[in-house]
């Protein structure tokens, strides 16, 4: 028994002490074509990334200034707005000649050379592609609807500029119909572009049906959506998929008249992609989705401008969103209808209506989320035909605001929208809920089906371990929701660990039975509340004396003493799986 206890002590201390002292350097990245045509929009994407190549999402808001070294070149805009380390802009370069484009964000500068394509050969295409394979390069002009037939592979080489005819109104823009396979093989140095031949006339959509697996990598798709509508809003589509598998890697689908995508009975993967400035993001139905390290921003308009709308999937299909951002729009960040969803390590911010809307079904699992500056943080409503909603929230920071809509400044909302029968259940742990009305239910206060434990709720709420007090955020007005600590917490500005004059009551206040994960040492042996609990960015534990700099074998909570408190932690977690 002594050997087993000692092994557990050593393992726990090793995990607790394995934390960074400061953060690595940042640098800017610029993803843009290496060539241009005067007056045709070029997608300019700017990112701030850390030494591990990850977007610096702690950089809440920033602006990248654009400039060129050729005085004969004019830019339609000279800035790119970044949300949480990433942003893009569709820029028209007018004039002639080669030039160097530079982007400067907070003193970090990056440049790329663009070559003038004026006078280059333009290949016109339309109708059905012949044979079993076609390769595009250079400048392609799609003058009428194009069909990639069954069994045919269309390969688009790096740097290809595909210009597509459009219309000024209606749904008759030129389409690319893919019944075979498309391989759009852009690179970081030479992205592929699909855009309008006339930038004032939007083209239709890319339609992928019953084809083989397709790939879009380093591909920009802009100025589309003049096509027949489908799905929730009825808006025209930029992409339509049915019964197909598609991977989007480092893609930017932005500045469109229509909805980003409608997908049925498909398998979608988005990695390192940016969806922006369209009617709304993807709407999926009977579709598997993996959405990782990707951003959806600026969905403004007049018809349900959600970042993403997730309908019920088929048995065996997963819907998972990880390490992303959904920022700024006129409706909801994540909207579900009957689907089972996991959203993990995500920032959902600045949505006029709801950060997360759960419409029946589920379960919907939200873990390590910042859900901030939305009208309502999380709302669940019932439509009995799709089942009763079950929402699981763990280690979330939910801070709502008054956006002017009904039920603004609400943290958790439970209501019947379509019927008066059924059950709406919440299971909330290790979270912070801050709003004028932190918990609102159509079924009275308190609602026994909203179960909250080990959380900081801005009102008295029955449950184990709940508190009601100031969480002591570092700088919420500038998007820093780390918990203050006299022992240390991450500072996005200095990129070091800083010590505050107060310690948040949410530190070491989570469920003592939950694993602390990679929380930095000293961590008290108990998980923190809020979005950063159980992560490397958790505020450190303070014991009313100078921070212990030495890891002592057996000192589980990091107070520089080995005593019965440490033994109690071992007992709580004895033989438990992570």
Image: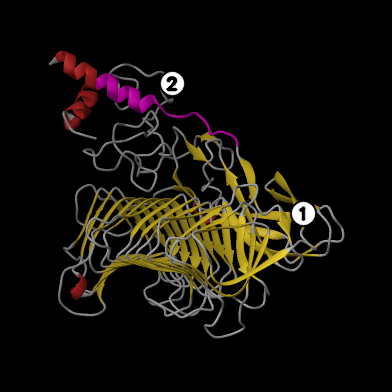
The residue carrying pointer 1 sits among few (fewer than 14), some (14 to 19) or many (20 or more) residues within 10 Å by Cα, namely some
Question: N-terminal of the two: label 1 or label 2?
Answer: 1
- Taking 89 as reference, is 465 above or below it? above
Q: Nearer the viewer, residue 462 or 306?
A: 306
Residue 357: give x, y in percent of width and height.
Answer: 34, 67
Q: Is residue 216 above or below residue 150?
A: above
Q: Residue furthest right?
A: 71
Q: Residue at x 58, y 42 (%)?
A: 493
- Report whether 470 appears left or right of 223: left
Pointer 1 residue: 115
**In percent of the image, x 68 and y 75: which residue is there?**
198
Q: Residue at x 51, y 42 (%)?
A: 54
Number of numbered discs overlaid on the protein picture: 2
Q: Quadrant of the C terminus?
A: top left
Residues in magenta, as a range: 9-25
Residue 549: which disc? Answer: 2
Magenta segment includes 13: yes
List x then y, in percent, for residue 317.
27, 56
Residue drawn 37% across and 65% down?
210
Marks 1 and 2 sit apart, C-alpha to C-alpha, by 55 Å
Q: Is residue 238 left or right of residue 429?
A: right
In the rendered structure, the answer to whether residue 118 lies left or right of residue 428 reads right
Mark 1 residue element: strand
Residue 563 visible in the displayed image: no
Q: Is residue 106 left or right of residue 349?
A: right
| Mark 2: secondary structure | loop
Q: Position of residue 170 (x, y in %)?
A: 54, 85
Q: In the rendered image, which quarter contains the N terminus? A: top left
Q: Residue furthest bottom?
A: 170
């Amino acid at each position: 028994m002594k050997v087993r206890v000692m092994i557990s002590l050593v393992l726990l201390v090793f995990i607790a002490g394995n934390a960074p002292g400061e953060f690595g350097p940042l640098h800017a990245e610029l993803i843009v074509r290496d060539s241009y045509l005067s007056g045709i929009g070029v997608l300019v994407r700017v990112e701030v990334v850390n030494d591990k190549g990850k977007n610096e999402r702690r950089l809440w808001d920033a602006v990248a200034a654009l400039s060129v070294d050729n005085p004969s070149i004019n830019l339609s805009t000279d800035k790119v707005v970044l949300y949480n380390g990433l942003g893009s802009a569709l820029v028209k370069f007018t004039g002639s000649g080669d030039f160097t484009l530079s982007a400067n964000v907070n003193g970090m500068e990056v440049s790329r050379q663009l070559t003038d394509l004026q006078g280059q050969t333009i290949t016109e295409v339309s109708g059905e592609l012949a044979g079993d394979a076609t390769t595009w390069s250079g400048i392609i002009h799609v003058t009428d609807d194009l069909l990639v037939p069954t069994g045919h592979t269309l390969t688009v080489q790096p740097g290809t500029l595909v210009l597509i005819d459009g219309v000024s109104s209606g749904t008759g823009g030129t389409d690319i119909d893919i019944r075979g396979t498309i391989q759009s093989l852009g690179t970081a140095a030479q992205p592929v572009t699909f855009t309008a031949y006339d930038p004032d006339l939007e083209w239709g959509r890319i339609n992928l049906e019953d084809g083989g697996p397709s790939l879009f990598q380093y591909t920009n798709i802009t100025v589309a959506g003049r096509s027949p509508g489908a799905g929730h809003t009825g808006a025209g589509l930029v992409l339509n998929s049915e019964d197909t598998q598609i991977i989007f890697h480092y893609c930017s689908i932005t500045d469109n008249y229509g909805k980003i995508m409608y997908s049925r009975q498909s398998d979608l993967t988005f990695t390192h992609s940016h969806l922006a400035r369209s009617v709304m993001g993807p709407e999926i139905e009977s579709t598997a989705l993996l959405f990782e390290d990707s951003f959806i921003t600026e969905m403004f308009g007049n018809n349900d401008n959600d970042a993403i709308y997730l309908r019920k999937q088929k048995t065996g299909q997963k819907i998972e969103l990880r390490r992303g951002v959904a920022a700024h729009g006129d409706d909801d960040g994540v909207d579900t209808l009957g689907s089972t969803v996991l959203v993990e390590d995500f920032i959902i911010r600045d949505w006029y209506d709801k950060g997360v809307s759960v419409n029946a079904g589920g379960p919907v699992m939200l873990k390590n989320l910042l859900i901030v500056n939305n009208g309502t943080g999380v709302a669940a409503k019932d439509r009995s035909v799709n089942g009763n909603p079950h929402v699981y929230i763990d280690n979330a920071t939910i801070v709502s605001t008054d956006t002017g809509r009904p039920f603004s400044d609400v943290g958790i909302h439970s209501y019947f929208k379509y019927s008066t029968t059924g059950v709406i259940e919440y299971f909330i742990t290790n979270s912070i809920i801050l709003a004028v009305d932190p918990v609102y239910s159509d079924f009275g206060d308190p609602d026994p089906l909203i179960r909250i434990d080990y959380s900081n709720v801005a009102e008295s709420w029955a449950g184990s371990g709940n508190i009601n007090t100031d969480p002591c955020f570092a700088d919420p007005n500038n998007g820093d929701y780390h918990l203050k600590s006299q022992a240390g917490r991450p500072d996005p500005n200095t990129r070091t660990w800083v010590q505050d004059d107060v310690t948040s009551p949410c530190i070491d206040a989570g469920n003592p039975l939950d694993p602390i994960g990679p929380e930095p040492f000293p961590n008290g042996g108990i998980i923190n509340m809020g979005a950063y609990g159980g992560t490397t960015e958790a505020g450190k534990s303070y014991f009313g004396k100078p921070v212990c700099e030495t890891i002592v074998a057996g000192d589980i909570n990091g107070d520089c003493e080995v005593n019965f408190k440490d033994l109690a932690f071992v007992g709580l977690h004895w033989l438990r799986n992570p």
